[in-house]
Amino acid sequence: MAKKIILPIDANANAVQCLKLSSPQDIDGTSAHAESAAIQGELVRIVAIDGDIRFLIGTAPEALVTSHFLGDHQEIWMPIEIGEKVSVLGGPAHIATAGE
């Protein structure tokens, strides 16, 4: 018999989606923009771990003060092409790929 998979539920009894994450890359863009290694997935989680950050995704990204904003201790899930990188400016961040 196949094993039944049960998703966790929230306070309203709605299923909460779960994804396995790769080991995070810690990148520190405190003094200048910093790039992650090439991402080997199609969905990336970015978390600002100590202060507000700016981020940019691309093949050779360079985050600027006009790039996407992410507040202190916030997270965002972004689609990404395999082989692209994440650049961060303003502070440290955790970068993890979903589904690895």
Image (spheres, rainbow, N blue to C red):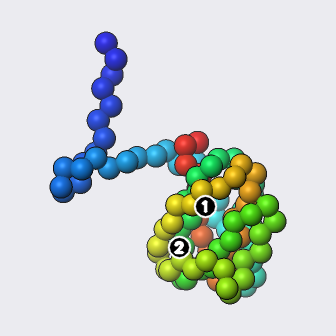
Q: Quadrant of the N terminus?
A: top left
Number of marks in the rendered image: 2
Q: From the viewer's perspective, is 11 left or right of 68?
A: left
Vertical comparison of 58 with 55: above or below: above
Residue shown at 74% from the left, 72% from the top? 34
Asked whether the viewer can see residue 28, the reply is: no
Q: Which residue lies at the image location 37% right of the left edge and 48% below the top edge? A: 17
Could you tell me the amino acid type at mark 2? Ile
The reply to whether the C-beta atoms of the residues labelled 2 and 1 are less than 8 Å apart is no
Determine the residue located farthest toward the left in the rendered image.
Answer: 12
Location of the C terminus (image quadrant):
top right
Answer above or below: position of 52 versus 34.
Answer: below
Between disc 2 and disc 1, the foreground one is: 1
SS for dot 2: loop
Residue 31 point in image, percent of width and height:
73, 85
10 Å neighbourhood of mark 1: few (<14), some, or many (≥20)? Answer: many
Of all residues, the one furthest to the top in this rendering is: 1
Dot 2 surroundings within 10 Å: few (below 14), some, or many (20 or more)?
A: some
Q: Quadrant of residue 25?
A: bottom right
Q: To which residue does mark 1 refer?
A: 95
- In the rendered image, residue 36, in percent from the top left (x then y), is placed at 72, 62
Residue at 18 percent across and 55 percent down: it is 12
Provide the residue designation for mark 2. Answer: 49
**Label 1 sits on what residue type?**
Ile
Q: Is residue 100 above or below residue 37?
A: above
Vertical comparison of 1 with 71: above or below: above
Q: Nearer the viewer, residue 78 or 51?
A: 78
Can you see residue 9? yes
**Mark 2 or mark 1: whose residue is earlier in sequence:** 2
Name the residue: 61% across, 61% down.
95
